[in-house]
Amino acid sequence: MHDADMRPPRPAFQGMLSAGDAPADPSRRRLLAGAGAAAVAVLPGQAYAWQPAAAYPDPAIQVLDPAFEPYRLFNAGVERIATGMRWAEGPVWFGDGRFLLWSDIPNNRIMKWEEETGAVSEFRKPSNYANGNTRDRQGRLVTCEHLTRRVTRTEYDGSVTVLMDNYQGKPLNSPNDVVCHSDGSIWFSDPPFGIGGNYEGRKATAELPHTVYRIDAASGKGEAMITDLKGANGLCFAPDGSQLYVVEGRATPNRLIHAYEVADGGAGLGNRRVFLDAQGGTIDGMRCDADGNLWCGWGMGEDKDGVMVVSPQGKRLGHIHLPERCANLCFGGAQHNRLFMASSHSIYALYVSTQGAAAG
């Protein structure tokens, strides 16, 4: 997502646009239409029985602190809008096309859900075992690929441009999560999760440390920004772009979220602090709302799976309980107030009383 005050004059691909603002350029319409139009079966999800709440308020939405009350709609409940995936990840909202994309990593495909009709289809297959997705400042799809160990950009005409596939002559590990800063730079994490076996990529030996990289918008040059975290995973910028949140997925004894000061107008990082200790929970992807609260994919295990909402001060405010572990999420919908949660086999959605931050 992007800072509202830095959007280009014709924001045809911004996530908060309605269907009436879809671009007139035919090549851009081709990108919005996606690569695959064939509908796929939406399976009943037998492994994880789920039923919508019978009454409001939905008991799956747990208030941990009174400060969460303003963000909960008493008459909105968790909905399951798609299921049948092996491992859902990397959701990204296209408001100008009124659809959601996400990765189904082991099935080697990117999926698409249409808001108007509820139709689910394959957007891209094969996807090179795609994981994280975002949109750049021009609204183009940016994707992390495990199989090819690269970060790509899908152009308006559907062609694919490689943004980065190596660093100092060595292949990347398996790009995981990706976000865009308001200066146009693209930041991504590169742990070895996708090369650990042959399920979400292909087994290979890591030649680089677990790293967070920055791709400069003007030069296209990639630079290693963080190299000392174990299993750098989910990324998110604060709404004003002044902080970068990074999940350390293999920290011991507990998984952590670190907060870094963003320096040099978005080109550097300053002081680091531990923002949140998961205390036995598992953190994956995350996004900020307009007030700076972090909405974090959370697990794993009974009473843990779902989304944890954390204040800018690091206090747990609320917990959206799901029957499956949430790997990643994003805000979308016509008013950018619908939370989409990629959770193991399924995609869940919930209307909330806030909007997603423009940045990160």
Image: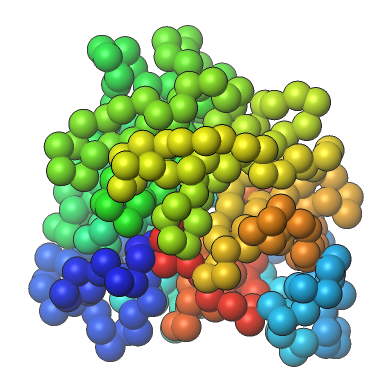
Q: Dividing the image into 4 quarters, which one contains the N terminus?
A: bottom left
Identify which residue is drawn at 62% across, 37% down: 273
Residue 6 shown left or right of residue 281 in the figure? left
Q: Position of residue 121 (x, y in %)?
A: 43, 63
Q: Tell me where residue 166 appears, x and y as whole percent.
A: 29, 21
Check the picture and name the quadrant holding the C terminus.
bottom left
Residue 185: quarter of image: top left
Instruction: Tell me if I can see residue 158 in this picture.
Output: yes
Task: Work out whether 128 lies above or below 54.
Answer: above
In the image shown, does 60 or 32 lie closer to the viewer? 60
- Give above or below for 342 relative to 230: below
Q: Which residue occupies 13% across, 79% down?
A: 24
Comparing 117 with 237, the one in front is 237
Q: How many marks?
A: 0
**Occupied quadrant, residue 56:** bottom right
Q: Is residue 351 left or right of residue 211?
A: right
Tell me the colour scheme of the image: rainbow
Could you tell me residue 258's position as x and y percent?
61, 39
Residue at 41% x, 71% y: name it: 99
Q: Identify whether 93 is placed above or below 176.
A: below
Rendered residue at 33%/46% (across/down):
266
The reply to whether residue 42 is visible in this rendering is: no
Q: Position of residue 318 (x, y in %)?
A: 78, 65
